[in-house]
Amino acid sequence: MLGSIAHGETLISGLLEGEDVLSTMAALRALGVEIAKEEGVWKVQGVGLDGLKESRAVLDMGNSGTSARLLMGLLGARPFTSHFTGDASLCRRPMGRVITPLMQMGVEFSSTEGNRLPLEVKGPAQAKAIDYALPVASAQVKSAVLFGGLSAQGTTRVIERIPTRDHSERMLCHFGADLHIQQEDGAEIISIRGGTALTGQKIDVPADISSAAFPMVAACLHEGSEVRLNHVGMNERRVGIVQSLIDMGASIEIINPRDVCGEPVADLVVRGGKLKGVTIPASRAPSMIDEYPVLAVAAACGEGTSRFLGLSELRVKESDRLTLMAQGLRAVGASVEVRGDDLIIHGTGMPPRGGALIKTALDHRIAMSFLVLGSVTSEPISIDDGSVIATSFPDFVTMMNALGAKMEGI
């Protein structure tokens, strides 16, 4: 997205070519941006903010809530109309949390009931800068407002009380945005001045910690195993899964730490062993919200009770992940409770028996989590739809089987 609105060429290596990213590319091409792959490197010919053209086609975001919300911020502040849709799962997800601040910037919306996709976004002649205090800890909302602020007149400020992932801020700075961060009264204030031209960059994308979590947990569950994961993004606001697994007794060695394009990166060596129950506070949720499903798998195989607190945000992801994980774990023989927004898993020190068909509800992380669990259960675990995995991790099955898993028919 940022390469598209920058001036000059952006070169991207290490890009995850999942369906979410491909949906974003298709939308940007429909807006007049040239994007092509040459010798393993993606080249984006930036057109600048003023170079984006109104799309004649509806922008289909597939399953990607991140793509939808960030593009709504980017395009909502432009003086033309855009139409968004997505797959059945995305069309159930709430967009009101993004619509509210963008309307304050002068953007007009027309949507289906409940502020859901499909929807129409009509940008003003000139977007207004705003001060917006995030009512929920959401990096997507923060990023949408900052992206809108690129086109606004004046300085847009986002105030967050609970720190969320900051990839957008780091990348905006890398592209030359006039962005500043300060602490004030216990909150972090991110300010961005509108109208500053961005410049194309060379980007080396680190491996996604959310994807790395699956082989990490798989390695933890197989005693005697050792898996090395190279070039993994170790942003301090994203590594809750690493800390949580270490708290559970996992052996994870962090080696060769370095900085790549403004992001901390390292290699991880994960060794199998016994895990124990642990309590994960609600304050850690923003740093690992996407990793709770696979962490729940680890807890189901550990010894003792694990309590994951404050998981309300899991109810509005690609599915109600809190409910689906509890139902799926019970189906394979684990002892699980849901108390309000807390997930409680009573581990026996052994994997549950397995032997169930899991309903994924079009959720890629639910699908992959139960396949990881199936690698250690005595009876096989099946999922109802493996195609959804391509949303974020198209090489998942191939990679896991290369590590010794036996995943078939997916």
Image (cartoon, helix red, strand yellow):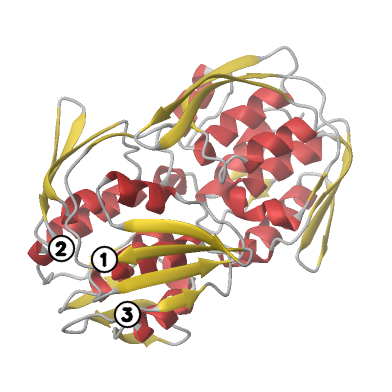
Q: Classify mark 2: residues with Cα within 10 Å, few (<14), some (14-19) or many (20+).
A: many
- Residue type (three-letter) at the residue carrying disc 1: Leu
Question: Which of 369/39 is in front?
Answer: 39
Q: Is the residue marked by circle 3 packed among few (<14), some (14-19), or many (20+) residues within 10 Å?
A: some
CA separation in Å, label 2 and label 3? 22 Å
Looking at the image, which residue is at 29% across and 57% down?
178
Q: Residues within 10 Å of mark 1 (few under 14, many from 20)?
A: many
Quadrant location, the N terminus: bottom left
Marking on residue 49: 2
Q: In the rendered picture of this protein, how many numbered marks are placed on residues?
A: 3
What residue is disc 1 on? 150
- Give whichever of 117, 80 is nearer the camera: 80
For the residues bearing labels 2 and 1, Cβ distance under 8 angstroms: yes
Residue 229 is left or right of residue 271, and the answer is left
Q: Amino acid at mark 2?
A: Leu
Answer left or right for 304 relative to 370: right
Query: What is the secondary structure assignment of the residue under circle 1?
Result: loop
Q: Which mark is residue 54?
A: none
In the rendered image, residue 292, in percent from the top left (x then y), is placed at 66, 48
Question: Residue 367: image x %, image y %?
Answer: 56, 46
Residue 99 in view: yes
On screen, residue 357 versus residue 42, left or right, reads right
Res. 47 image quadrant: bottom left
Q: Is residue 289 left or right of residue 46?
A: right
Residue underneath mark 3:
119
Q: Amino acid at mark 3?
A: Leu
Secondary structure at badge 2 equals helix
